[in-house]
C-alpha cells in the first residue's frame, strides 16, 4: 500500500495516528536541524517534518520528486498553523522515507501561479496539469459533466454513443477525413456533430437522448475554438421549442447553484431576445448582458445632420449608430485613435467621435458640420452628459453591427463593467432561416439544413426565403454563444425542398443524405434538440481567457499538439496500405 490517506484529508482527529502518504514535493524548506516538505497529491498538501540526522537521504530531495513517507500525525506548534490549508493544523513527523522517483529541474515552477509562455506550458502539459489552477479546472469540468449526466438521467434521458467514423456530409466547416484501408479510395469523416445520428435515434424511438460528444471541425483556430471539442448533444421527441428551452434553463440554473455557488445569475427566468433586437441593441447575436452601453440608432437624424459621411450612409440604405462610452470623455486623441483602429479591423472605414469633458468642453471629428439643432438632437438621442464619449460608425448594416458590437465589448472591459462573478444567460430566438451568399449566389441555412422553418413561414421558402424565420434558439452566456439548437424537419418533402433551396442537386442530396431521407418515410416523430459546448461553458465558469485552459491536452492556435508534435509525417508503408500518396507543393 502506497498511502493510507491522501494529502488533503488529515486534520486534528488524526493526531497520534501513524499514516502513510505518497505524492510530489511541492516545496522544500531546510531549517538546519529540520527539513520541512509540503507533500502534494491531487487532493491537497500536507506538511511533513524530517530529521536529516535520522533520514540523511532527505537532504537531497528537490521539488517534484515523488516520495512515500510514514510517520505520526501531530499538531503544529503554536503560531505555526496555516489557515489557507485544510491540513493546516497538523503535520506529520516522518519515521520512514522512500524516494519513488526523482525529477529533473523544471522548465517552469509548479508551486506558484506565474505567467509562463503558453507554448512551453503546452510542450510540458503533463507538468502544467500539476499546477493548482489547472487541477481546479479539470475538477470543475468533471463536476459540470457529472451534474449534467445525473440531471438528464433523472429526467428520463438515455446516454447513447454514436460513431466517430461516419460519412462526410459537410455542415459548414471542413471535415477531418479518415482514409479506409479496406475500401481503397474511400473515406470516413470524423463527425462535426452527431446531428444526423441523433435524429435517427429519434426515428428509432429513443425519445430522450444525450451524449457527451466529441466533435471535430477543420477550421481556423480562435480562443474559443479547437479542432476537437466536446459538447452536450441532446435530442427529444414529441417536444416543442418552449419545452427544450425550459429543460436547459432549469438544468443550468441548478448546475450553477451546485457547482459554482460563488457565481450569481443576473436574471431568472433568463431574458429572451429576438435576433433582430439583439443586433439592434448590442451589434451581435451573442451579447454580453452584464452591462449596458447599448447601440443607439441615429440613422433618422443623419439626413439633416450636415455631416456628409452620415448623410451618404443613410442615403445608400446603410445605418448610422453610436455608443455612449460613459466616463471616457477625457480620452486623448491617441486613445480615440486606438479605438478607431479597433473598428477598422472589423470593416469600418472610421470612427466618428464627440468627447465631452467633465467641464463641458466638446472635442469632435464632425461637430463642426452640424447645426445647433442637429447637435442638440444628437446629444439628446445619445443621452449625453459631461464626461461622456460618443462614438459612431456609419456604413452598411452588417459592418455597423460588427464594428460596434466588437467595440462595445472592448469598452465594457476598459470600463470594468463585466463582473467576473456574474452569469448573464439569455436566449436568442427568431433567427433568419436563410441568408443569401453573394459569393456563391445561393441561399445558405443560418443554422443547419435540418432546422425547421417557423410553420407560418413555410410558404415564404417559395416566394421570399430571406423573410422566413427558423425554429432556432441560441443559448448565450457572457459574450459567447454556448449552445445552438432547433426544432428539426421531420418531413421528407420539406427536407428535400430545403435541399433544393440551398442549391443541392437532388442526386447529390440522395448520395449524401439518402439514409436520413429514407428514414423519414417510416414514421418520424416531431423532434428537436440543442448542443451546449462543454468547453466554452467551463471556460466561462472558471473565468479562463480561452478554452485551452479547461481541456487536458489541447492543440495550440496553429492546431498543433506541441507536446506530441502532431500532426506528423507517417511512414511510406502506411500510405501505401491506404492507397495514398503525398503530393509535394
Image (spheres, rainbow, N blue to C red):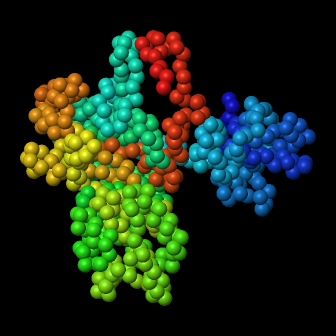
The residue under the point 37% across, 31% down is 175
The residue under the point 48% across, 83% down is 357
Q: In which quarter of the image is residue 562?
A: top right
The residue under the point 34% across, 17% down is 186
Q: In which quarter of the image is the N terminus?
A: top right
Q: In this view, does 105 lie above or below 431?
A: above
The x and y percentages for residue 233 are 33, 39
Which of 515 and 145 lies nearest the eye of the viewer? Answer: 515
The x and y percentages for residue 425 are 36, 58
Which of 570 and 51 lies nearest the eye of the viewer? Answer: 570
Q: How many marks?
A: 0
Residue 257 lies left or right of residue 75; in this view the side is: left
Residue 514 lies left or right of residue 363; in this view the side is: left
The x and y percentages for residue 405 are 37, 61
The residue under the point 69% across, 31% down is 2
Residue 362 lies left or right of residue 452; in this view the side is: right
Q: In which quarter of the image is residue 4?
A: top right
Q: In this view, does 510 lie above or below 375?
A: above
Which of 342 and 96 lies nearest the eye of the viewer? Answer: 342
- Asked if residue 112 can be seen in this view, the reply is yes
The x and y percentages for residue 66 are 73, 35
Q: In this view, does 576 lie above or below 582?
A: above
Which of 483 and 315 lies nearest the eye of the viewer? Answer: 315
- Asked if residue 73 can be seen in this view, the reply is no
Amino acid at each position: 500500500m502506497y498511502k493510507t490517506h491522501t494529502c488533503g484529508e488529515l486534520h486534528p482527529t488524526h493526531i497520534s495516528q501513524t499514516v502513510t502518504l505518497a505524492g510530489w514535493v511541492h516545496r522544500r524548506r531546510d531549517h538546519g536541524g529540520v527539513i520541512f516538505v509540503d507533500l502534494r497529491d491531487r487532493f491537497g498538501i500536507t506538511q511533513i517534518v524530517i530529521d536529516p540526522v535520522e533520514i540523511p537521504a532527505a537532504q537531497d530531495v528537490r521539488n517534484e520528486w515523488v516520495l512515500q513517507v510514514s510517520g505520526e500525525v501531530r499538531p503544529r506548534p503554536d503560531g505555526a498553523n496555516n489557515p489557507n490549508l485544510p491540513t493546516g493544523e497538523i503535520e506529520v513527523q516522518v519515521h520512514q522515507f522512500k524516494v519513488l522517483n526523482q525529477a529533473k529541474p523544471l522548465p517552469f515552477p509548479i508551486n506558484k501561479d506565474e505567467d509562463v509562455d503558453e507554448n512551453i506550458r503546452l510542450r510540458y502539459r503533463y507538468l502544467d496539469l500539476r499546477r493548482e489552477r489547472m487541477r481546479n479546472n479539470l475538477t470543475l469540468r468533471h463536476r459540470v459533466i457529472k451534474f449534467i449526466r445525473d440531471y438528464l438521467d433523472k429526467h428520463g434521458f438515455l446516454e447513447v454513443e454514436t460513431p466517430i467514423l461516419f460519412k462526410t456530409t459537410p455542415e459548414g466547416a471542413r471535415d477531418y477525413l479518415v482514409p479506409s484501408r479496406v475500401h481503397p479510395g474511400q473515406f470516413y469523416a470524423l463527425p462535426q456533430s452527431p446531428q444526423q445520428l441523433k435524429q435517427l435515434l429519434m426515428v428509432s424511438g429513443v425519445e430522450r437522448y444525450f451524449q457527451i460528444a466529441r466533435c471535430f471541425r477543420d477550421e481556423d483556430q480562435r480562443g474559443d475554438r479547437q479542432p476537437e471539442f466536446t459538447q452536450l448533444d441532446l435530442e427529444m421527441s414529441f417536444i416543442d421549442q418552449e419545452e427544450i428551452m425550459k429543460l436547459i434553463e432549469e438544468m443550468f440554473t441548478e448546475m450553477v447553484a451546485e457547482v459554482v455557488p460563488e457565481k450569481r445569475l443576473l436574471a431568472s427566468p433568463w431574458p429572451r431576445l429576438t435576433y433582430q433586437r439583439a443586433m439592434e441593441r448590442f451589434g451581435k447575436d451573442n451579447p454580453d448582458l452584464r452591462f449596458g452601453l447599448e447601440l443607439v440608432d441615429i440613422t433618422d437624424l443623419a439626413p439633416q445632420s450636415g455631416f456628409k459621411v452620415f448623410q451618404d450612409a443613410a442615403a445608400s440604405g446603410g445605418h448610422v449608430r453610436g455608443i455612449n462610452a460613459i466616463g471616457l470623455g477625457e480620452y486623448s486623441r491617441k486613445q480615440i485613435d486606438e479605438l478607431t483602429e479597433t473598428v477598422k479591423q472589423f470593416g469600418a472605414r472610421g470612427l466618428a467621435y464627440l468627447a465631452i469633458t467633465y467641464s463641458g468642453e466638446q472635442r469632435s471629428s464632425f461637430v463642426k458640420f452640424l447645426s445647433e439643432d442637429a447637435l442638440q438632437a444628437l446629444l439628446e438621442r445619445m443621452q449625453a452628459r459631461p464626461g461622456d464619449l460618443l462614438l459612431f460608425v456609419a456604413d452598411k448594416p452588417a459592418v455597423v453591427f460588427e464594428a460596434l458590437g466588437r467595440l462595445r465589448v472592448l469598452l465594457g472591459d476598459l470600463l470594468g463593467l463585466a463582473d467576473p462573478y456574474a452569469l448573464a444567460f439569455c436566449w436568442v430566438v427568431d433567427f433568419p432561416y436563410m441568408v443569401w451568399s453573394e459569393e456563391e449566389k445561393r441561399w445558405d441555412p443560418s443554422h443547419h439544413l435540418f432546422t425547421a422553418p417557423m410553420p407560418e413561414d413555410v410558404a415564404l421558402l417559395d416566394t421570399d426565403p430571406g423573410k422566413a424565420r427558423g425554429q432556432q434558439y441560441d443559448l448565450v452566456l457572457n459574450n459567447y454563444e454556448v449552445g445552438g439548437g432547433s426544432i428539426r424537419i421531420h418531413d421528407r418533402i420539406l427536407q428535400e425542398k430545403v435541399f433544393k433551396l440551398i442549391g443541392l442537386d437532388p442526386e447529390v442530396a440522395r448520395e449524401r443524405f439518402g439514409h436520413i431521407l429514407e428514414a423519414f418515410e417510416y414514421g418520424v416523430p416531431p423532434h428537436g434538440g440543442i448542443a451546449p459546448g462543454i468547453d466554452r461553458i467551463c471556460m466561462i465558469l472558471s473565468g479562463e481567457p480561452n478554452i485551452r485552459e479547461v481541456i487536458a491536452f489541447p492543440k495550440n492556435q496553429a492546431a498543433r499538439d506541441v507536446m506530441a508534435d502532431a500532426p506528423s509525417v507517417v511512414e511510406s508503408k502506411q500510405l501505401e496500405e491506404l492507397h495514398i500518396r503525398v503530393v509535394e507543393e
